[in-house]
Amino acid sequence: MSKGRLEAFSDGVFAIVIALLILDVRLPAGVHVSIAALEQVLPRIATFVLSFVVVGVYWVAHHNMLHFIERVDRSLLWLNLLLLLCVVFIPFPASFLGTDLRSPLAVRLYGVSLIATNAAGTLFWSYATLGARLTKPEVSREFAWRIVGIHSAPIAVYAAAVVVATIALALSLTLFALVPLFFIVPNRWLRRAVGP
Amino acid sequence: MSKGRLEAFSDGVFAIVIALLILDVRLPAGVHVSIAALEQVLPRIATFVLSFVVVGVYWVAHHNMLHFIERVDRSLLWLNLLLLLCVVFIPFPASFLGTDLRSPLAVRLYGVSLIATNAAGTLFWSYATLGARLTKPEVSREFAWRIVGIHSAPIAVYAAAVVVATIALALSLTLFALVPLFFIVPNRWLRRAVGP
Amino acid sequence: MSKGRLEAFSDGVFAIVIALLILDVRLPAGVHVSIAALEQVLPRIATFVLSFVVVGVYWVAHHNMLHFIERVDRSLLWLNLLLLLCVVFIPFPASFLGTDLRSPLAVRLYGVSLIATNAAGTLFWSYATLGARLTKPEVSREFAWRIVGIHSAPIAVYAAAVVVATIALALSLTLFALVPLFFIVPNRWLRRAVGP
Amino acid sequence: MSKGRLEAFSDGVFAIVIALLILDVRLPAGVHVSIAALEQVLPRIATFVLSFVVVGVYWVAHHNMLHFIERVDRSLLWLNLLLLLCVVFIPFPASFLGTDLRSPLAVRLYGVSLIATNAAGTLFWSYATLGARLTKPEVSREFAWRIVGIHSAPIAVYAAAVVVATIALALSLTLFALVPLFFIVPNRWLRRAVGP
């Protein structure tokens, strides 16, 4: 398995998942076009935007990880499929959340799904880089660990969101949004960790 | 992030969106095949063709912009995702419009969605080219500004369509169709602005 | 627009259309799993297989045409999008036909849709090759015309299928299946026209 | 038809199928978010994970086969489309199985669908390699036959699953899961057959 085909296949899966998310933003069958109908769809639009950004950030992260990986072995291939399994799953908790944005259960399922994705990403990176198994020569042990930190830190944030969902739902949703924003908005911490 | 992978990923997203549009052209569940059923689907077919052409023109525009861009930085990456977010969103207003082609609300939502996409495209181009930040050497300041004009001009047309939707719905729909036609049918103005 | 990206984008669209066809093969909501339910889905499975093969043959034809084309201009780009529009549309008549395989109306819509696709393909090829506008040097005028014949001949077969749909529906469906079979099963006529 | 484009097109189809599987994991329309609703979806989630892994293994197998194939002829092209037809079909038996995980009929349909896919894969490989028709020089006759064995062995397992479905449903489902696990979990037999 060449690295190029793994990349192309993964890119295809990411592109499809990110586009499929809109299929959930639909009027229920038989509902007429009206402001009220549009308002009913608003939670689904909000969940769509959130999930689009979340999956977009995962795509960029996947891309950045592969940049430092030199070659692909059989195990990394399956770890990549595990990561893709988590990413492909996201439209379901997204749909669940879009059905009822005020349900702690939906918020918790969404959070658990993101935790699983970040854990799979961390596993993917750790397998490839710790022990310098499959990485390019320029990847230092210290850099590898720093990226482990960046991939696993959101797990703590999502876990907090899952825990507080019952008592402070708005806070949970805010935490979901803050993680991708941290990676998108240029900031000192990110620059220090991964360079410009 | 290499320019090649950004291109490939964006192409994938465009291809999926353009193909997903047909999923909305379906008989309602339990409806029998008949001329009447087909007539009921006609507004959805019309919206499908319009949206296919609109997204197709966005794809060509995206492609043309990237042709003049030499390298990709972190911010351009996110601006590209913002543009893709707008493109992926289009099937929803398209579905809304297909549900009721004579609803001013649906026409307005469709128009606003296209305005957002053109604004995101203009932002993408402006960031990359003004100040010659990421452009190839042959891109002159004057050419960059001309393309800003071409990307933002449709915003005015769509805004007009949004405004007149309540009083002249057919005119709004005609305006939606005229913009892609301007880019498809060979004409003097386009040739003068971007060459043959 | 480079030929490579046109190819990649078109391949993406073909791949998505061919895979989306299965979305129409589904049990109606609330129906229990049973032999009877499976029998109810049979017309949809038959339509799926037919349409998969039809779109597959279009993909191979598209690929073969591009093999002889050297460069892409703005008009060929739009003709390609016209061809893709016809291909992306096919899942709708396929769904219509799968709803009622014994409806002459559904058979006719399916036939008209395939006629439009072959006409668009013929147009695409004619524009590129007649006058040797965009073709590789080895493409002779005679070869170009032979391919025009191969792309337009199915139009006559599909037109016959449309005409006889009311009086001999099974014949119409057989004609739909015969066209792709002609291109798939190795035969003397095809070999003489396009080589081994 | 170059090998590269066949690969890219097939990768696209695999990526779409693997991502479409999640569309079947949805709450029924009008159902509220609750633990009970989530439990109702559990069989669909289980079927999704199983089918994701099954299709993932088919993708890797397809990839591995092409690695040893040097060139593509017209017949291999159609055999590849036959294989893709089987793969694209999988979401339907998956949806059938997800509707009722305890239905022997659904289990049998799923098994038959996988048998067809493995048979198509075996045919694809046999055509290309037996007689060394299209293979790279390093592919020995013995290696070619070994891969035939690896591709056709699961047929026996799936056939057993189909047979015992009525009397031991859980065993059938276990057999479905064991086949991909055999290819994923590193083991002596696989290593001996295809190398590390």
Image (cartoon, coloured by chain):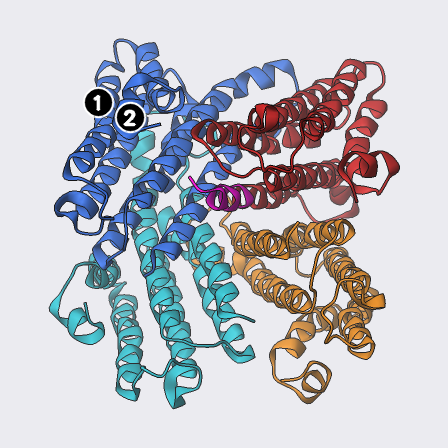
Chain colours: A red, B orange, C cyan, D blue
Q: Circle 1 sits on which residue?
A: D159
Left of B94 or right of it: where is D40? left
* Magenta stretch holds residue D152: no
Left of C186 or right of it: where is C67? right
Q: Which residues are magenta?
A: A1-11
* Residue D94 percent coordinates (x, y): 40, 29
Q: Circle 2 sits on which residue?
A: D111
Left of C104 or right of it: where is A172? right
Question: Which quadrant does the N terminus of chain C fall into?
Answer: bottom right
The residue at 40%/68% (across/down) is: C117
Q: Is residue B43 above or below residue B139?
A: above
Front in this rendered view, residue C125 or C139? C139
Please report, as a chain letter, where disc 1 is located.
D
The residue at 28%/9% (across/down) is: D168
The residue at 32%/45% (across/down) is: D66
Q: Amino acid at mark 2?
A: Gly
Please report, as a chain letter, where disc 2 is located.
D
Circle 1 crowding by C-alpha within 10 Å: few under 14, some 14–19, many from 20:
some
Of the residues under marks 2 and 1, which one precedes in the sequence? 2
Asked if residue C35 can be seen in this view, the reply is no
* Residue C193 percent coordinates (x, y): 20, 75
Within the image, what quadrant is residue B187 found in?
A: bottom right
Circle 2 crowding by C-alpha within 10 Å: few under 14, some 14–19, many from 20:
many
Q: Is residue A116 above or below residue B65?
A: above
Q: Is residue C7 above or below residue B140?
A: above
- Mark 2 touches mark 1? (CB < 8 Å): yes
Within the image, what quadrant is residue A108 found in?
A: top right
Q: Amino acid at mark 1?
A: Ala
